[in-house]
Image (cartoon, rainbow, N blue to C red):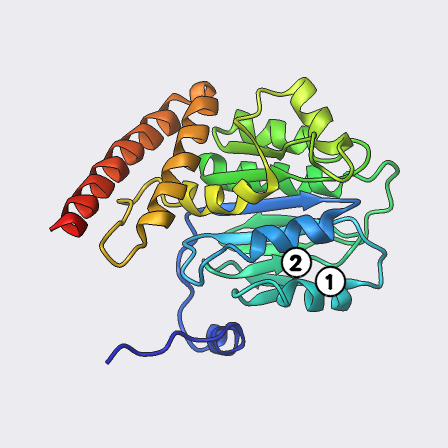
Amino acid sequence: MQKPSLTADERLKRQGDASPSRVTDLILLGASAGGHHALAEILRTFSPELPAAIVILLHMPLDSLGRLKESLARSCRLPIVEVETQETLRPGFVFVPPPGWSATFSRGAITAEHVVRERPTSTINRLFTSAARCYSNRVIGVVLTGLLKDGTEGLRAVHEAGGLTVVQDPGEAEYPDMPTNAMETLPVTFCLKLADIGPALELLVRRTARFETGLEVAVRMLRARTALLVRLVEQSWRNPSTRTFLEGELTSLRRAIRSIDDLLKD
C-alpha cells in the first residue's frame, strides 16, 4: 500500500531530523504591489516533490512577516520557512526573508540581511544578484507585478550568469512597472501569463532530469503541458540549451500522448 504523502507541517517538522539535500536549482520570486495574489496563484500549482528551493521576496511593511506566511500557507502545499537569521536551503521548501530585508546565499544556505531602507527599494536586486553569484545557471529569476523597477538589475545578473529569467506578462499584471522595466532593458527568457508561470517553473527545474509521463497522468493534463511547452519553445531562442531541452520534452510528450491514445482505443 502506498504511504500517504507528508503534509507541509510534517515535512517542516522533520527538517531538522534529516541531512539536508543538496540544492541544485533555485527559484526566486520577486514581487511588489499586487504580489499577494500573484504569488498565491503560482504557489498553489507547485507539487510537494518540487526539486528546487523557492525564495520569495515581496515588498511589504516591516512588521508583516507573520501575515505573509499565513496568507501564502493557505495556497501552498510546501513548507514555508521564515528566514530570521540563516537557514539551510532544501528542495521543496519555500523561504521568506522578513519584509524590508533582502538575503544572501553561500554554502547551501540563505542568510537574511539587515533591514534595507533604500529608496527606491532594491531588495529584489540584491537577492537575485547574490543567488546568481552562488548558483549561476541553476537560478530561475521571476519578476512579478509591482511598481518602479526593482528586480531588473537582479534579472540581469541571473541572465549574465547563465540562468533563466521570467517576467509576468505586463498586459495582465495588476501593476506592470516591474515586468515592463525588465523587458525594456533585458533579453528576458520568458514572458508568461500568471497561470502559466507555476507550471512552467515546475517543468523548467526538471530540465536536467528525464521528464516523466505515464498512464497515470490524465491525457487532458498532458495536452495542457504540450500547449505550455509549445509556448515556451517559441520564447526560448535566447537560450539554446534550454530550447533543446524543451524541444526534446515536447517530442517525448507528443509521442507519449499518441501511445496513450492508441491504448485507449483498444
Q: 210 or 226: nearer the eye?
A: 226
Q: Which residue is drawn at 23% across and 81% down?
A: 1
Residue at left offset 57%, top offset 63%: 76
Rendered image: mark on residue 96 = 2
Mark yes or no: residue 109 visible. yes
Describe the element under mark 2 as helix, strand or loop.
strand
- Residue appearing at x 20%, y 47% in the figure: 260
Classify 136 as above or below 113. Answer: above
Residue 164 at x, y percent in the picture: 50, 32
Residue 184 at x, y = what percent? 69, 19
Q: In this view, does 258 lie to the left or right of 135?
A: left
Can you identify the residue that label 1 sits on? Answer: 68
Give the spatial CA distance, label 2 vs label 1. 9 Å
Q: In this view, does 11 lie above or below 56?
A: below
For discs 2 and 1, the disc positioned in front in the rendered view: 1
Q: Can residue 84 be seen in this view?
A: no
Contact between marks 2 and 1 (CB within 8 A): the answer is yes
Q: In this view, does 220 lie to the left or right of 34?
A: left
As displayed, is residue 180 above or below residue 217? Answer: above
- Badge 1 amino acid: Leu
Q: In this view, does 107 lie above or below 239?
A: below
Which residue type carries mark 2? Val
First-in-chain label (2 vs 1): 1
The extreme front residue here reads 265
